[in-house]
Amino acid sequence: MIGFVLRRLLQAIPTLFVVVTLSFFLIRLAPGGPFDLERPLPPAAMANLARVYGLDQPLVVQYGRYLAALLTGDFGPSFSFRDLTVAELFARGLPVSITLGALALGLALVLGIGLGALAAFRRGGAIDRLVGLTAGLTLAVPTFVVAPLLQIVFGLSLRWLPVGSWEGGAPAHLVLPVVTLALPQVGALARLTRASLAEVLAAQPVRTQRAMGLPPHRIARHALRGALLPVVAILGPTAASLLTGSVLVETIFGLPGIGRYFIDGALNRDYTLVMGTVVLVALFVIVLNIVADLLSGLIDPRLRISR
Amino acid sequence: MRRAWGRLARNRPAMAALATLLAVALACLVGPALTGHDPARIYPDLVRTAPSFRPHPRPDSIAPAVERLAFRMRVAPEAIRVEGDTLHLVLSAPRPIDERVLSYLPRSDLFGPATIVAREAQGRRLTVEAPLRRLSFPLGTDVLGRDLLSRSLVAGRVSLLIGLVATGVAMGIGVLYGAVAGYRGGRVDAAMMRLVDVLYALPFVFFVIMLLVFFRAGIGLILVAIGAVEWLDMARIVRAQTLSLRHRDFVRAAEALGLSTVAILRRHILPNTLGPVTVAATLLVPRVILLESFLSFLGLGVQEPATSWGALIAEGSRALESAPWMLAAPAGFLVATLVALNVLGDGLADALDPRLSEAR
């Protein structure tokens, strides 16, 4: 298993390399710089700034330096938050984004698998159709429509929940963002669970168990375990779309997470902050994919042998 | 193929979805010419009017509007009366009235050009008639007073165009790439798919955002950016299909007959990948439209004066408290289109491969 993790991490190196290289040169090719202000700085000051941040060096040298620093885990200083390093910004933003993402993932898993299983066990019934409709809706109504609607209903009309801001992660402030972030995943997971569970329930072993007179809840447990495989397999992509969604959710609800730093950083040409965020997100996706594969192996021993 | 079409035609939700799509597309294409409003026309007196088929101006809003106008014309209005579609009123002032001030009336969006019926007291009293402008806004107007129906339809053109063209771009790249990788096989295939794997793990949305922030956003750039991102799935699907076709007898026969690789791909491989590709493309269009809306919502996509559903939704969500219909109109179009495309895609998948649908 350790060998497997190591091999997967090694395979991730080219991906990370492409991420760093692509984002580095994309940013540098773009017009504008981090120190462009409404009133331009005097040329001497600009030259000084450029020297301090190493921007006066040839691009290839800068690239090499950045890569070398990154290998030691140094994301460099932020250009727009002058006194802070990118790592310090991450230390502030990550707890927000991770809290948001983890809660949303948990909610989506519980609701999605629960609803999907319910629909599969009552296939063709009213519950099945209701779940199908709900899943279709959560998938089709985009986050940026759901979020304002939730804000106006629960925030402004009913006044039950605050419409935004973080406030140290107070539970009331978390509800709307987490629900908004989780909803599309609920739909996707419910559909997937229903389809794969329906397949498992129609398969040979379940019929045998029924014939042997196993009580329904025991059968359900066996079937669910088998049906969870595709669900676990899409955990990686799910986590990735949660990360993307958090850009939007953090913007709409005014939360100081990584997604907000990314957008602000891009607008301010904060080279290091933007590159750091992209690298961080790529790392997250890679690690979560490995975790998803490990979980698949736990559920289905056949997958362990084949690799 | 014909049997697949028959199966699709029997699938009622899919046919309803197809009808919805055709209706939305047709409305976006010809609708803006039929609403009676230029989508860019601003009606300053009809800002944030709620959706309704009843025409403006409403009877109860005529008198206040006339009084506002009269104040600017520096005259006093009397005997304001509406008969049918005509406004009758008497204007008076301490000094003779400069008749040019009457041009205030047609400038107000509510009334047509005024005619003077009678002059009294050396021009200090004018009896005036003006037709009422009968404007209706079925979906209301936005914060600037622009017709939301026209704007939603024009925005739909952009959204649908981006959806179709970007999908086309992705399909072009993906099909070609996948077919070559699958047909060549061996090391070429391994290398090409390794690249796809690497690209797959990239946080692409972040790259698209960077691209649009750094290089001024425009429709062309959005098309390229989205198309360049979304071809990976297509490449995988086509490669898998091609791999399974490569050693079939008809392909071998074509090889034995000495057909060139290009000819084999075009004549024997690609037509046989058409089914899965169609399904994937149908399901890709809503994803592309959603991605474009997402970018436009963040203010990175389509820029004024052009607009798309995402951009309109962004405007609507900012004016949600004072004018909720501004969100409802574009969101309704967007959601209807997305649902219809998804249902149609599922229907196509069932029709082309009925074995799969049994599990559902």
Image: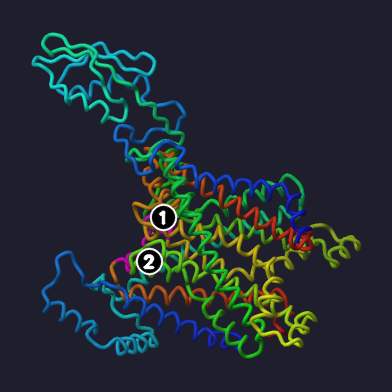
Tell which residue pokes out farthest to the left in this image: B95
Q: Which mark is residue A91?
A: none
Residue at image position (76%, 51%) is A122
Q: Residues within 10 Å of mark 2 (few under 14, many from 20)?
A: many
Residue at (40%, 87%) from the top-left corner? A71
- Check disc 2 and report the residue beneath it: B212
Query: Over which residues does the magenta segment extend?
Result: A248-267
Label 2 with label 1: CB-CB less than 8 Å: no
Where residue B235 sits, quadrant-wise, is bottom right
Q: Which residue is mark 1?
A: B297
Quarter of the image with the C terminus of chain A is bottom right
Q: Nearer the viewer, residue B24 or A170?
A: B24
Residue B334, above or below A11? above
Kind of residue at disc 2:
Leu
Seen as rendered, the residue at the extreme top is B121
**What secondary structure characterizes most of the magenta part?**
helix
Residue A262 on the magenta span? yes
Judging depth in this view, the residue of B191 and B257 nearest the camera is B257
- Residue B116 placement, left or right of B357: left
Q: Amino acid at mark 1?
A: Phe
